[in-house]
Image: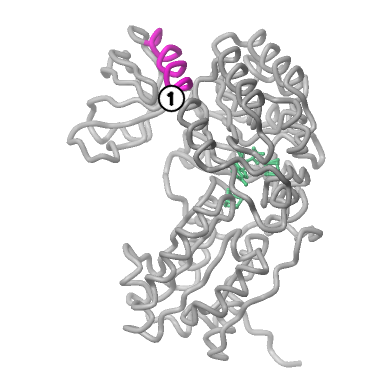
Amino acid sequence: MPAITDPADEVRRWVIPGESRAYVLTFGCQQNEADSERLLGLALSMGYGRAETPEEAELILVNTCAIREHAELKALSIIGGFKHVKEKNPRVLIGVCGCMAAEPHRVDDIKRRYPYVGFTLEPAKIGSLPSVIAEAIKTKKRAFLLPDGPTAVPPIDEGLPVERHSPHKAWVSVMYGCNNFCTYCIVPYVRGRERSRESGEVLAEIKGLVSSGVKEITLLGQNVNSYRSDCDFAGLVSRIGEIEGDFRLRFMTSHPKDVSSDLIACFCATPHLTAQFHLPLQSGSDAILKRMNRRYDVARYLSIVERLRERDPAITLTSDVIVGFPGETDADFAATLDVLKSVRFDSVYSFIYSPRKGTPAAEYPDPVPPEVSRERMRRLLDLQCEISAEKNRPLVGQTLRVLCDGPSPDGTPGIMTGRTEGNKLVHFAAPEELAGRFVNIKIDRADAFALRGTLTE
Ligand code: SAH
Ligand code: SF4
Ligand code: F3S
């Protein structure tokens, strides 16, 4: 029998130790950030070093997002810029990963218009990175595998190497894919059908992370609360609550239709679980929700909010809203503003509707003119900014437990940033050694987007 060679070994023979480095560029959501940690982990396991810039890399992986047109165009423009890197060094291998690599028309487009891109690799097949690279090195051929499409239920790759971005915060994917087919959304087409990890695998991973000093775990899934394996999502959260250690637990993103009473009951009862819930609303109009195929109405959404607040009046609530969905009238939009006024979310991520090829809504009549969408967006942002500021104001004078992330990304010397239990951003003066530690911060100032405070004993 011929010896079966490990593709990773073949890549290792090609890689020049100390010289060949890998660069991973990430677009999109937390799932993609988690996937990028795996892509980098795989690259390092094959002998690549870590590149600080694409110019010094021999392996460039672009982990793309397809959620809105803007995200796709940005990625394509950056990929276009890598032409000169390949021209300078023919050993450079450029791979397009992520959700765009699961769109057949994009794969085709990349193949034709970006001749220096060596391969595409859809998210469900990250584990094949070594064999794709080994093949590219061996055959010198470009590889554009046809994505498996929306009916695929790809197996879950357990145990891939992970190169985590932060030593004290970790993403833990618990389920993959989405079965909801909201009519505007590309995710079910590019991430395949829902599949959940065994709870034992998740618990073992979290125990390992906590014992290595990780202070915050965020469970990830496109539709995280529809997790189901040997237990449901509330069951999983409760079991994680039994793990000993000083760490915080968060999860995202939840779908309102799958918020169970058991999950609501976890708040204030499950150790480690933070008082924070991100629950996308998308629209405050029942007619629009129906056409979005969201499978809840405003009354049901509001009842979940009420039950969450009964459980914990101080819970931080955040949401996503789409503005300018096809056929959205002034009255529909006013209904969205009404829900924002009555719920008073701590913050809202709002997006102008972007038609996605292959989704039902892309064929819907009555597109909202861009200038109308922009005007609605501006009104929504103004309203929410006011509400967020009002919600943060009472925090002034309080002392909050904050997980210190590290130096402020804007580079202000001596200023650190961190997150409260409710996931609010805080800036404060502190020594850098406090990164990764829980600290008590007395809040001195609060505006809509951030808090400022002083380190206390
Ligand atoms: N699985 C999550 C997140 C999906 S993507 C969920 O169900 O909420 C994150 C957000 O992007 C969505 O909540 C939605 O508000 C927005 N989004 C998705 N598709 C979009 C589109 N075609 N145009 C504009 N916004 C979109
Ligand atoms: Fe997209 Fe809807 Fe699935 Fe969220 S639940 S990923 S918005 S299809
Ligand atoms: Fe984008 Fe894919 Fe996430 S489309 S938002 S990277 S699941």
Q: Which span is picked out in magenta? A: 382-395
For this view, does 103 lie left or right of residue 420? right
Corner quadrant of residue 299: top right
Quadrant of the frame with the C terminus:
top left
Q: Is residue 158 above or below residue 337?
A: below
- Residue 457 seen in the current view: no
Q: Quadrant of ligand 2?
A: top right
Identified by mark 1, the residue type is Lys
Give the image location of residue 42, x and y in percent.
53, 65
**Residue 61, percent from left and from top:** 48, 67
**Residue at disc 1, secondary structure:** loop
Residue located 72% across and 47% down the image: 361
The residue located at (73%, 41%) in the rendering is 199
Residue reaching furthest to the left: 413
Q: Nearer the viewer, residue 271 or 130?
A: 130
Residue annotated with mark 1? 424
When the figure is inspected, residue 328 is found, relative to residue 170, above or below; the finding is: above
Q: Quadrant of the N terminus?
A: bottom right
